Image (cartoon, rainbow, N blue to C red):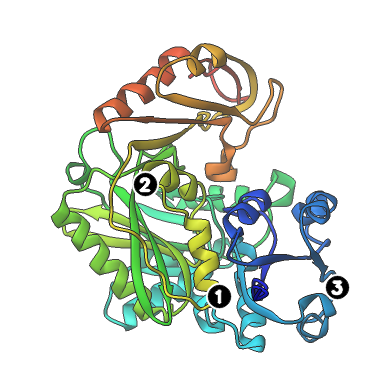
Amino acid sequence: MTTPEPLPRLAVVFDFGSASPMGILASARGLARIVFLCDRDLPHVRSRYDDLRALAPVCDITGLTDEQILAHPGCADLAGIVTFSETQLNRTAALAGRWGLPFLSVPTAAAVTDKYTQRRILAEAGVQHTECRVVRDPADLDPALDAVGLPAVLKPRSGAASARTCTVHSLDEARARLRAFTDPAAGGSPGEFVVEQLLTGDPAVAGEGWADYVSVESMTSHGDIRHVEVTGKFPLAPPLRETGYVVPSTLSEARRAEVLALTTAALTALGVRHGITHTEVKLTPGGPRIIEVNGRLGGYVAELVRRARGFDLVRAALTVALGRPGDPPPTAYRRHAFQFFLTPPMDAVTLRRLDGIDELGAVPGIHLVEVLVEPGAALDWRRGTLAYLGIVHGSAPDHRGVRRLVDLVGRTLRIVYEGAPNSDETPTN
């Protein structure tokens, strides 16, 4: 009897990201043997380290240089490397380059994690010009806003999940927001920001009740770009926080084709040859426009695509990390799947009560009400999308059914917040 060849070893550089350890291991079954590369100096890694060691092989890279990681016995005989964490893209690209493994190149990883550099590359390639300026301190705001115009978007030069991101309508507002985002005494943290042109959306493209932007989930292997999904969105919460996703989107075939063509051009310009990407696209009166390209799997999207279509995006990411061709199946939807985030108002600072969870969970079409905070928890809108209370997971036969279920969330849950000290009243949902 012939002994089967052992599965290839695939390194996952671990940190907070868009796929859980259990999800990664489940998706890797029959495809690869996973080894987690763990830097215990990172708070999220440190908190999960013992659990990870109980699940799978772990290579402790704490305090190691890239050269030392390359020589580590636990990293021997790797056939691929990947990360699902925005913060680890550059490190993973550097290691992949040293090992000669398929992943984003070092320049491409730098471009997809640096919003200013990305804008410059897209403009130079003729894909899209969007006014964007770097802001290092409040003194930079005046000339930056003169160049970009108002209103504008203020956001970290590198970041994810809309954290510390907002629109600004005046120089004074921009100064106040930048101080709040960067002053440790006010709960902020130092760092470079950008101000960029605010893209004006056309609400008619996706339709009433839906957001004026979508995301494109793509898999690329050896430069062959395959688009897997166009993900629809629920309208943003102020100042620019995502409130949930739906698969499939509501776009017409013609609009979908425009979005995919723009995404292909952007990925090509940025030099993406390997990996999973998550590209956010604004739907404007003049056609689709790139908001930003992310060089990793989008948060929460894999679970939606799996429920709606039965396709595993995590496994797809592992597959292209091994240098194998990406081959998504034909688009065929089992159901319209959604995730709706329980998003507090901007002036909420504390959760007082959250009632109606069991009642909502009993509604047909609602699969899970995932609550992530308890009464008494502090809330801060500056955390962006991750400032939510929880996620409602569900599905329906069509988009009308999805909207009916999402509208029911607001009528069923009873949420009471404590407002900021200068607010006039206690906000509720």
Q: Can you identify the residue that label 2 sits on?
A: 309
On the picture, is 120 further left or further right than 179?
A: left
| CB under 8 Å between discs 3 and 1 | no
Which of the pair 116/297 is nearer the observer? 297
Report whether residue 129 is seen.
Answer: no
Q: Read off the residue under disc 3.
A: 63
Q: Nearer the viewer, mark 3 or mark 1?
A: 1
Q: Considering depth in this image, is 220 or 91 the residue closer to the camera?
A: 220
Q: Residues within 10 Å of mark 3 (few under 14, many from 20)?
A: few
* In the image: residue 155, left or right of residue 337: right
Which residue: 21% across, 34% down? Answer: 208
Front disc: 2 or 3? 2
Residue 9 lies in quadrant: bottom right
Q: At label 1, which amino acid type do we have?
A: Leu
* Image position, residue 418 (x, y; %): 62, 20
At mark 1, the secondary structure is loop
The alpha-carbon separation of the residues under discs 3 and 1 comes to 27 Å
Mark found first going from the N terminus, 3 or 1: 3
- From the image, which quarter does the N terminus lie in? bottom right
